[in-house]
Structure formats: structure tokens, C-alpha cells
Amino acid sequence: MNPPLPKQKHVEPSNMAAPKSTEASQQQYQLLSANYQSPTNEPFKHVQKLPAPATTKTTDRTAYLAALRKATAEMQEIINKELTSRMEEDKAREAASNGISKLNSAKVDEAKEEVNYGEEVAEEED
């Protein structure tokens, strides 16, 4: 059995004012963030501040996890929109550089393009 640790006393220096103890100033946060960078597209960043659980009680942790789940779903929606717009920019840039008209580029299988986005795919022969 370990002996009890001695109690330590914290002394504030006389030239420093102690911060006012308010619930808002003691609230700690976790950051959920995503960063996107590309050599050809504008970067984007999304940061969401989530209040950390106040205690280790199950109810506080459950509430935090629910907020994290919600924030993650919202972030995924934002990221999907941002990446879709960048994919469209890439397609337009590629079409312009290849001299393909907008009508011909519309014939592209959109689902296949999305699955293979960013990948070099060899053309299949029919």
C-alpha cells in the first residue's frame, strides 16, 4: 500500500490576478477538423469546436459522442459538396484542355467517373 501523497498548496503571485471562475471560462473544447489541399484546386478547411465532456460520467460522455456523431455527419456533407465542386472544376479544366465540347463531355458515365476520380483508368475495349 502506497502512503498518501502530501497535499500541495497553490499560491498565486501577488502581481497576477486570478482569473474569474466562470463556467464558460472552464469549458474545454475538442476540435474536429478537415483540411484539403490540391495543386490544381482551391484548398478548404473545416473546423468545428465541440465541448469536451465535463466529467467522465456516462451521461456526459454519451452526450459528447452524440455531438461528435452529429458534427461528423455535418462535416462529411460539407466535404462531399466541396469535393464534388472540385471534381466538376477538374472535369471542366480537362475538357477545356482537350478541346472537348460540353455536349461530348456530358456523355461521360458520371457514376463511373466518381468511382474512379483521381485514378488513372485504362479504357476498356468493348
Image: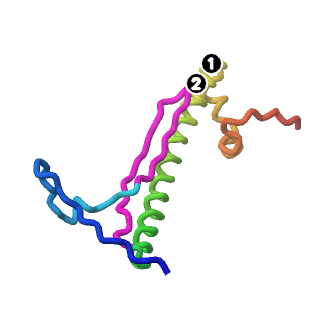
The amino acid type of the residue labelled 1 equals Ser
Q: Which residues are magenta?
A: 31-55
Q: Are marks 2 and 1 in contact (CB under 8 Å)?
A: yes
Q: Quadrant of the C terminus?
A: top right
Residue drawn 56% across and 26% down?
Answer: 39
Where residue 79 appears, as percent x and y from the top left, is 50, 47
Name the residue carrying label 2: 93
Image quadrant where residue 96 sits:
top right
- Residue 52 sits inside the magenta stretch: yes
Q: Does dot 2 land on a helix, a strand or a loop?
A: helix
Where residue 12 appears, as percent x and y from the top left, is 17, 56
Q: Nearer the viewer, residue 114 or 65?
A: 65
User: Would you place residue 111 above or below residue 3 in this image?
Assistant: above
Residue drawn 81% across and 33% down?
Answer: 122
Name the residue carrying label 1: 97
Q: Nearer the viewer, residue 28 or 114?
A: 28
Residue drawn 54% across and 41% down?
Answer: 83
Relative placement, left or right, of 71 versus 80 is left
Q: Does dot 1 land on a helix, a strand or a loop?
A: helix
